[in-house]
Amino acid sequence: MLALKTISRGMPFKSKAANIGKDEIMSNISTANKKKSNILSASPAQIWKSRISWRIALAVFLTILAVQAIILNFTLRDFENARLQELREVGRSAIVPMIDSRITDLLASPISPEEAEKLITLTKVNGLSIYSNQLDLITIYGEPLALVMLERESLSKTYRSTDGSSYEVVYRANDLGRPFIIVARLASSHIQPQVQAYVEQTIIVMLLMSAFVTTVLMIALGHWLLEPILFMRNNLIAASKNPENPNIADSPYDNGDEIGEAIEIAQNLIKQNADNISRIKGAAQDKIHKLAYYDTLTSLPNRTLFIQTLSERIKKASAEKTERFAVITIDLDHFKDVNDSMGHNVGDAILRAVGKRLRSAMPEVATVSRTGEDEFAVTMPLGGDVDNSKALADKIAAVIRTEPFKVFNEQFQIRASIGVSTFPDDATDPDQVLKNADIALNRAKEEGRDTIKEYSEDFDRAVQQRFQMLRDLRDALEKNQLELFYQPQLDLKTGEVFGAEALLRWWKPDNSKDGGSFVSPGEFIPVAEQSGLIVPIGEWVMQTACEAAINWEKEYGKKVRIAVNVSAAQFSQSDIVTFTQKVLNDTGLDPRMLELEVTESVFMDDIQHTIQTLQNLHALGVELAIDDFGTGYSSLSYLRQFPIDRLKIDQSFIRNALNNPDDASIAKTIIGLGHSLNLKVIAEGVETLDHEKFLIDHDCDEVQGFRYSRPVPNDNFVEFITGYDGKLSSFV
Ligand code: C2E
Ligand code: MG
Ligand code: MG
């Protein structure tokens, strides 16, 4: 109790919740005081309504009644005895004067028959037995009596008739003043009503007394016990309704007794509880705030807080028309590679280190935020040393570049692509300023990374064009404006056309004299990939290409394996295995007659998932080729794990092989590498006889290129394969 008091005094009742202001607390207290009179104090009316009061009252009332009933039981007998005693006295007073004192014969009746007659008719005495002092019956007057004196012990007896109408008593010589014993029967029927009246009166008194005592007790109990308990109960109810901010009044009761003490404990507990709730809520709110607005890895503000800060600054700056701001977005180059090859621990440590370095290099007034996985953003008012956004971007690039990041005892040289936008020069809306910086950042990434790009309206136009292209492409898919062209693939040793690559074409109608033009897949495939539209497009390609291959075999007897290009996005965004299986089932194409071409970019996504998907595809029986090999991210160790059948040397190496020794040696190396891994090697972009000779000389297996045929519509491709004489030299 003592400890509790100390704690409660040590922690005065106040709300620590961040949002509850002083005013609010004060208003709560005043409302509480106002309500105090009608809610918090226990009125007498409330006491009489309380169930416990009634139970106590009833118990007290009945107890008093029971005690009085027991007492009545005793006093009733005394009362009756006293009445009988009085009657006996009445009888004696009537008899004694009738005794003839002159009688000397102790065996003769001292009362004459006449006197006896008078006694019986005029007094309460209605029968007499007269005995000598030696108990000899001398005479009897009136009806014989029930009490008969045969021995001395009988002298102390009395007799009461069962209906209470007569009472027989013995008067001894002492009572009479004469040496006789007289037994008299006295009429006692008047005593019964007297007893009854006594009982009735007593009961009324008892009831009044019980009621009085109960009332007094209830008032006392009410004041000392029930009122405080009801006060405590009302406070507990108020606390349970609003535990965080309970409307409870201070106790008016003295804490010197047990009830007062209990109230004080309850009050303190309520206040402590409120205090705890406020504290827990405050802590939870802090935590939620932190989770919602801060990045857990770097502890920097997240994108939401960054935009919020930016908005506030811009609002203030717009109002004062003074400040200009730089908004810089930063994306770490090839961070995914580091993450995939070194593991997430290393990746996380680098992100933390970058965040730390950026934060400490930027002045206090700058907001440094982690806005995405490997993306950071900085905003800062311009002026003083840094009076233009580009200067700030240069500083940021230098901060990241100056020295490698040392993580787990390894050095990592990190580069970044940086987008720059300025308020209010580029936009006045906070979202737009950030968006512009992101657009500039994307441009920096597209232009080979490790660069800084300042936002320009032209970028915006390019973005708008992309959006337009996406809308048109959706339309094209619905209106069947997509078409597949086929380009033959030939075996360098036998000259046979063993396959064809399906290449997508988009015939986009316009107002030109041709009625439209082909849009290059190089233009629209990236847009389709970014938007996810590549999934339905890719499915249409696979379905159409397989149908074409079946048709070539059934209609023209030409077994030609069809090669279909598959984007990395199709691996991550769709179940390509199930879909491939479905197409094979639907078309009835031999799985070995389908080849899927993937670029090295698929290996940059979830590597385990990629390996699993490729293995499942291979298990279906389809062939797998790596397209544009040599241009992307190649890991020889991964290459061994993939179930690949074919490497496709990128056309750039073939194009330059004859005049650039480096490209020639890359082409040769790829052929050697493919053979050492037991893979077929196909060269694409074969345009001339010299290209072909170079490839034959270096033992390349297969070729594809304009030298044999450009990609052509289905009908032209059928013409090609049906008209082909099987000799490579025919192209000379
Ligand atoms: P790719 O898969 O490497 O396709 C080969 C590209 O080289 C084709 O360009 C083809 O026309 C071109 N080509 C073939 N032989 C020669 C040659 O001798 N000289 C020259 N200069 N070029 C030659 P295209 O059709 O413009 O396709 C470009 C890229 O678009 C393809 O590169 C492929 O990555 C993508 N693509 C095409 N169709 C699809 C498709 O259905 N799905 C996906 N995901 N990507 C596709
Ligand atoms: Mg290809
Ligand atoms: Mg290629």
Image (tube, helix red, strand yellow):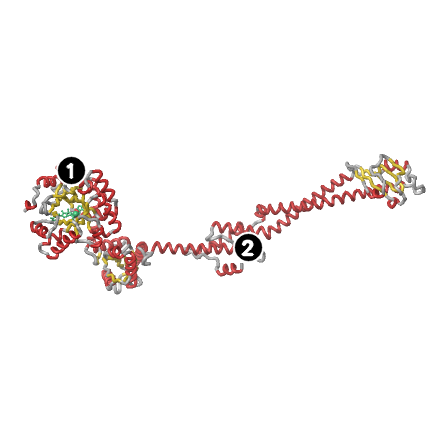
Viewed as shown, does residue 327 lie left or right of 1?
left
The Cα–Cα distance between marks 1 and 2, rounded to whole angstroms, is 94 Å
- Please determine whether, in this image, residue 557 is positioned above or below residue 290: above
Q: Which numbered marker is on residue 262? A: 2
Residues tagged 1 and 2 counted as in contact (Cβ below 8 A): no
| Residue 560 point in image, percent of width and height | 14, 41
Q: Which of labels 1 and 2 is toward the front?
A: 1
Nearest to the observer: residue 722 or residue 335: 722
Residue 96 appears in which quarter of the rendering? Answer: top right
Could you say whether the residue bearing mark 2 is in a helix, strand or loop? helix
Q: Residue placed at 15% from the left, 46% from the top?
A: 520
Residue positioned most to the bottom: 385
Q: Is mark 2 within 8 Å of ligand 1?
A: no
Q: Amino acid at mark 2?
A: Ala
Mark 1 / mark 2, whichever is N-terminal: 2
Residue occupying image coordinates x 53% and y 56%: 265
State whether residue 645 is above or below residue 283: above
Is the residue marked 1 within 8 Å of ligand 1, measured from its CB?
no
Determine if residue 220 is in view.
yes
Point out which mark residue 551 bears. Answer: 1
Q: How far across and down, in percent of the image, does residue 581 sit?
A: 23, 41
- Amino acid type at mark 1: Asn
User: How far across and how far down the image is residue 612, in percent?
Assistant: 25, 48
Q: Quadrant of residue 587?
A: top left
Furthest-top residue in this view: 143
User: What SS does tag 1 mark?
Assistant: helix
Asked whether, in this view, residue 173 is left or right of residue 652, the answer is right
- Percent position of residue 368, x then y: 29, 59
Q: Is residue 425 visible?
A: no
Q: Residues within 10 Å of mark 2 (few under 14, many from 20)?
A: some
